[in-house]
Amino acid sequence: MTISSRLYEGEKDFQTMLDLMARVRPSAHARDYPSKVDIEENLAVEEIRASTKLWFDDGHPIGWAYVDDGNNLRWELEKSYTDTVGAEMVAWGEDCIQKTLAAGESSTLDASCREDYKERLDFLSKHGFRQTENFSVQMKRDLCDAKPILEPELPQGYVIRPVKGIEEAEAIATTHRAAFGTDYMTTENRLIIMNSSEYDPTLDLLVIAPDGMIAGYCTCSTDPDGGGYTDPVAVHPSHQRKGLSKALLLKGLGLLKERGMKSAQFTTSGDNISMQKAGESAGFHLENRNLWFEKQVKN
C-alpha cells in the first residue's frame, strides 16, 4: 500500500472525483450536497481549485477534499481509509483556512452532514469537529402522486418569466444579496451558475415587479435519476410577504413535472421559518435535517 496525494490538475480530475463519489457515497445519500453540478460550480473558482486535493493508493483514487468559499470542508473517501487519509484530509482543510489568517487570528473549518448519515457523523466526531446549533432542512414533494399542483397566485402587476440571459446576472445577484443579507452572490458567481453544464435557462425563474424590478427568483434544475430541485429561492426584502416564494415554488413544480421529474426538493436554513412555511403551502414536507459542525483553526 502506497498512499500519495496531489493537488487538483484539471478536467480529468473532475471526472475522477465524480467517479469516486458515485462509488463510495451510499445510494441513500446520492442527492446530498455537493452534487455533480455543485462540485462543478465550486471548481470554477480559482481559489477553490487551489484548495482541492486528491488521494491515491498505488495510483487508485481513494478520496478527495476541498475547502469551499464558505470555509466548508467537502470530501469523499473510501471507508477503509477513514483513520489514516481522513486525518490528512482534515489537516489539509485546516491548512487551507490557516493560510487565510493573519498572525494570532482564528477561524473555523466547517462541515455539514445529514443527521441520518452515521458514517459521516462518526468521521466528524473522530476528527475533532464540534456540532453547532445551526442546521438546515431539506424539504421534498412527490410529483408522482395524484395531488394537483396549484396555479401560482401573484399580486396584481407581478409576473413570473424565465431569465432572459446572462445580461440579467448582475440584477439577480443583487436580489440574492439583498434577500439573504450576504455578499456571497457576486455577478461572477451568478455567471458560474449560468455557465454550468446542467443549467437550463427555461427553469431559471424570475418574478418581475410592476416597476420592472427583479423581485425574486427560483433556479430549478433536474437530474438523471428523476429528482428535481427548486432552489435557491430568493425574494427581495421590499417584496416579501406577498406570497412570491410560494408562487415561484408552484411554477417550478409544474415545470419539473412536465419534464418527468418524480420528486422535487429544496434546502433552506433551519431558522428560515417563512421559507419552510412557503414550502409546506406548496405541498412540500420535511425530508431531513443537515447538522453543522466546526473545528477551531488558529494561526
Image: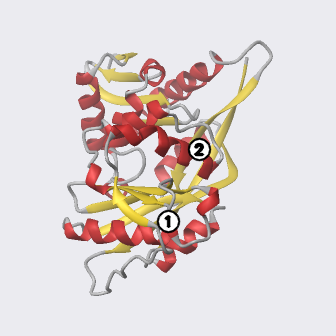
Horizontal placement of 264 versus 97: left or right? left
The front one of 158 and 196 is 158
Determine the residue positioned at 57% across, 23% down. 91
- Which class describes the residues within 10 Å of circle 2: few (<14), some (14-19), or many (20+)? some
Determine the residue positioned at 39% across, 35% down. 191
Determine the residue positioned at 35% across, 65% down. 252
The kind of secondary structure element at disc 2 is: helix
Give the residue at mark 1.
288
Horizontal placement of 244 versus 102: left or right? left
Give the residue at mark 2.
177
Q: Position of residue 190 (x, y in %)?
A: 43, 38
Q: How is the image coloured?
A: secondary structure
Q: Position of residue 254 (x, y in %)?
A: 29, 72
- Which class describes the residues within 10 Å of circle 1: few (<14), some (14-19), or many (20+)? some
Q: Position of residue 54 (x, y in %)?
A: 37, 23
The front one of 129 and 231 is 231
| Residue 82 in view here | no
Horizontal placement of 262 versus 5: left or right? left
The kind of secondary structure element at disc 1 is: strand
Mark drawn on residue 238? none
Inter-mark Cα distance, 2 to 1: 26 Å
Pick the quarter of the image with the C terminus. Answer: top right
**Which amino acid does the dot numbered 2 rest on?**
Arg
| Residue 92 in view here | yes
Q: Position of residue 74 (x, y in %)?
A: 47, 36
**Which amino acid does the dot numbered 1 rest on?**
Asn
The front one of 115 and 147 is 147
**Picture quarter containing residue 153?**
bottom left
Please tell me whether residue 149 is drawn above or below residue 2 in the rendered image: below
The front one of 92 and 8 is 8
Pick the quarter of the image with the N terminus. Answer: top left
